Amino acid sequence: LQIEQWLVRPRRVLLAALTATQAAALECADKEVSARGPGFTPSPEKSMEAAKTEWLKKATEVFSDATVETAKDPKVMCASQGLYSNCTITAVPCGAVRATPKAN
């Protein structure tokens, strides 16, 4: 089992540049959110996309407009086993619209 860790770079995950006005309108959560894909996949790209999808599900529970592009301190860690990989994304969600808590 091999584990790799790196900061999210534009070539790994497409990040949009925010204008100063957009960035000033954002608020960030107090805690990081972590998520990983459902299992090992034969494609590192699919593994990263799966982790991103799962992270967004959790992040939008904090800020309804959260995106990976607006996240603070994003980090990706991928575990590889042979040709298969499973990635985890950890980042602080940021957004302009706080999500409404779900009723149980």
Image: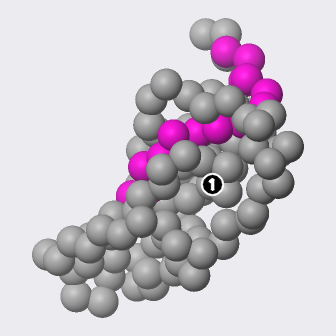
Residue furthest to the left: 1
Find numbered disc 1 in the image and state the secondary structure of the residue it sits on: loop
Q: Depth check: 7 or 42 in front?
A: 7
Which quarter of the image is occupied by the C terminus? top right
Report if residue 77 is visible in the image: yes
Q: Depth check: 51 or 24 in front?
A: 24
Q: Is residue 2 left or right of residue 9?
A: left
| Above-or-below relation of 92 to 76 | above
The residue indicated by pointer 1 is 68
| Above-or-below relation of 10 to 82 | above
Which quarter of the image is occupied by the N terminus? bottom left
Residue 60 drawn at (x, y percent):
67, 36
| Above-or-below relation of 97 to 81 | above
Which residues lie in the magenta part? Answer: 88-101
| Above-or-below relation of 96 to 22 | above
| Residue located 42% across and 49% down the image | 90
Quarter residue 10 falls in: bottom right
Residue furthest to the bottom: 83
Residue 9 drawn at (x, y percent):
52, 73
